[in-house]
Image (cartoon, grey):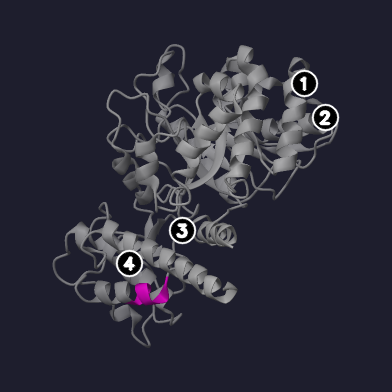
């Protein structure tokens, strides 16, 4: 009976804390090859301010995981390549790794996957024989801990393992890797895990010697006569990203695998490089690529082979890594510098609530979808009272009265406060019920601050830190998390009574 209750408790706790997301989303990679690595709490603050809900770590650093606890951010943890030897040779070592780096943090940390190594087949082929044993041992450990339902296991591959990648319909995996890839794909099928793939149109463009047009690499619109056409399928390709993803699908099909989804674990564009050898590593091109990528993924465009099928994608990367070796551009793939300052301006208008480091004033503060109505009402009351927002437009007969819902009225008030305080850090939080978006919420004659530059505050605006009716945003978030846990525990206790 005790075992049954524990399993049911874990199930309920997992449901409360781990919200699966099978649709389109954008995440970011967090590397740490920096001369001054931001503190984990600084990193999570930046993630929350940008509404980044998915991250991939290149290890399982306990301090970083502690900072991610109770944030709801979905996390991929990684087994570094140098640990493959130990884990691939010992079931017990794999079990210890899962116990220390996963089970000890879950479900407070919303761990969704373990990335086993990174580009092992291309970067460290001598370790290839250890890859499948390591994945199986880790899976065994997840099963033993009853976590396999929530956490998937895969390994990120370089797209270079796909040969003859255009046209995509002719693509196939390097046959010398069949002894690893064939059982791996069967493993991914049986566990419902994705094929993790690193896709870098920048490198494809750079190595093509002019064959691949820059516009094709950057998702820029192409006239029909410039689109690449797969002669075998007559599918039209307007960008390198889709072509590489479809090449992976066709390569799996060549091995009779049809039901393993592709997850892009790395992609991006450098914003700086050596002017003589890397002239296209510029802020404008980085902005163009990542802004277009985000829209493409978040719109669930899919690919020509699988239209409408989401391709979860992780941008490389959150921060510039100034100590990375190699060419100049290797250090400048970040969306932000190590101080959290945007490396360049993303132009994401219309892309939703993600990565609002668009500094063109086209960002808005809105009520978070699914927020508790009572918390929304309390935040609305604060904004229209102590927050000094002029809420007269929300009264009956005024342009923003309809729709007469707490969510709509809160959005108007939150956004007015956000713009009235200069869109400063922390001014769109409101105890966690507000979020920044690049989608204009204006409707009809109700024009929101930001669209016309107006910001409606009565008198002097308050300090950014006072916008959320709390004694500290962390305190209120913790209360919310404890409340959710309390509900779960109550349900478990009720079940225990019923089963006695």
Residue 36's place in the image compared with 207, above or below, is below
In primary-sequence order, the first of circles 1 and 3 is: 1
CB under 8 Å between discs 2 and 1: yes
- The residue to which callout 3 is attached is 439
Inter-mark Cα distance, 1 to 3: 46 Å
Mark number for residue 178? 1
- The residue to which callout 2 is attached is 255
- Point out the stretch of residues depicted in magenta: 372-377
Name the residue located 43 percent from the left edge and 65 percent from the top edge.
484
In primary-sequence order, the first of circles 4 and 3 is: 4
Q: Secondary structure at mark 3?
A: loop
- The residue to which callout 4 is attached is 414
Foreground tag (4 vs 3): 4
Name the residue located 65 percent from the left edge and 18 percent from the top edge.
128
Observer-nearest of 88 and 92:
92
Name the residue located 59 percent from the left edge and 63 percent from the top edge.
1
Inter-mark Cα distance, 1 to 4: 55 Å
């Amino acid at each position: 009976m005790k075992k049954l209750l524990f399993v049911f408790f874990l199930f309920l706790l997992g449901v409360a804390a781990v919200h699966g997301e099978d649709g389109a989303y954008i995440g970011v990679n967090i590397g740490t090859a920096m001369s001054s690595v931001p503190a984990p709490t600084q990193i999570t603050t930046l993630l929350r301010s940008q509404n980044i809900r998915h991250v991939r770590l290149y290890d399982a650093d306990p301090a970083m995981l502690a900072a991610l606890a109770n944030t709801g951010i979905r996390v991929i943890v990684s087994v570094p390549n140098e640990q493959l030897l130990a884990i691939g040779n010992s079931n017990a070592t794999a079990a210890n790794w899962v116990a220390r780096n996963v089970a000890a943090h879950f479900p407070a940390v919303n761990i969704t996957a373990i990335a086993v190594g990174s580009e092992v087949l291309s970067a460290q082929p001598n370790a290839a024989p250890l890859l499948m044993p390591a994945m199986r041992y880790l899976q065994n450990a997840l099963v033993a801990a009853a976590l396999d339902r929530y956490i998937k296991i895969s390994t990120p591959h370089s797209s270079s393992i796909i040969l003859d990648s255009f046209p995509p319909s002719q693509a196939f995996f390097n046959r010398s890797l069949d002894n690893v890839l064939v059982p791996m794909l069967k493993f991914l099928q049986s566990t419902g895990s994705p094929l993790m793939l690193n896709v870098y149109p920048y490198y494809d463009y750079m190595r093509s010697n002019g064959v691949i047009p820059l516009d094709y690499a950057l998702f820029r619109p192409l006239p029909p006569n410039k689109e690449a056409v797969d002669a075998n399928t007559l599918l039209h390709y307007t960008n390198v990203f889709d072509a590489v993803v479809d090449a992976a699908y066709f390569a799996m099909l060549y091995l009779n695998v049809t039901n393993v989804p592709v997850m892009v674990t790395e992609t991006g564009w450098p914003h700086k490089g050596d002017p003589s050898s890397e002239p296209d590593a510029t802020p404008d091109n980085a902005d163009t690529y990542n802004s277009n990528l985000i829209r493409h993924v978040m719109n669930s465009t899919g690919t020509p082979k699988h239209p409408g099928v989401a391709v979860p994608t992780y941008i490389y990367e959150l921060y510039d890594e100034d100590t990375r070796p190699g060419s100049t551009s290797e250090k400048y793939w970040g969306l932000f510098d190590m101080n959290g300052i945007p490396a360049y301006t993303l132009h994401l208008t219309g892309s939703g609530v993600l990565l609002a480091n668009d500094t063109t004033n086209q960002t808005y503060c809105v009520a978070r979808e699914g927020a508790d109505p009572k918390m929304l009402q309390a935040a609305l009351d604060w904004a229209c009272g102590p927050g000094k927002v002029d809420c007269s437009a929300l009264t009956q007969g005024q342009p923003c009265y309809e729709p007469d819902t707490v969510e709509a009225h809160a959005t108007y008030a939150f956004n007015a406060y956000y713009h009235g305080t200069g869109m400063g850090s922390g001014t769109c939080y409101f105890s966690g019920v507000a979020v920044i978006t690049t989608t204009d919420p204006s409707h009809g004659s109700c024009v929101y601050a930001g669209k016309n530059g107006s910001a409606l505050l009565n008198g002097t605006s308050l300090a950014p830190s006072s916008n959320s009716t709390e004694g500290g945003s962390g305190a209120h978030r913790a209360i919310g998390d404890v409340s959710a846990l309390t509900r779960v525990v109550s349900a478990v206790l009720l079940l225990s009574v019923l089963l006695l």
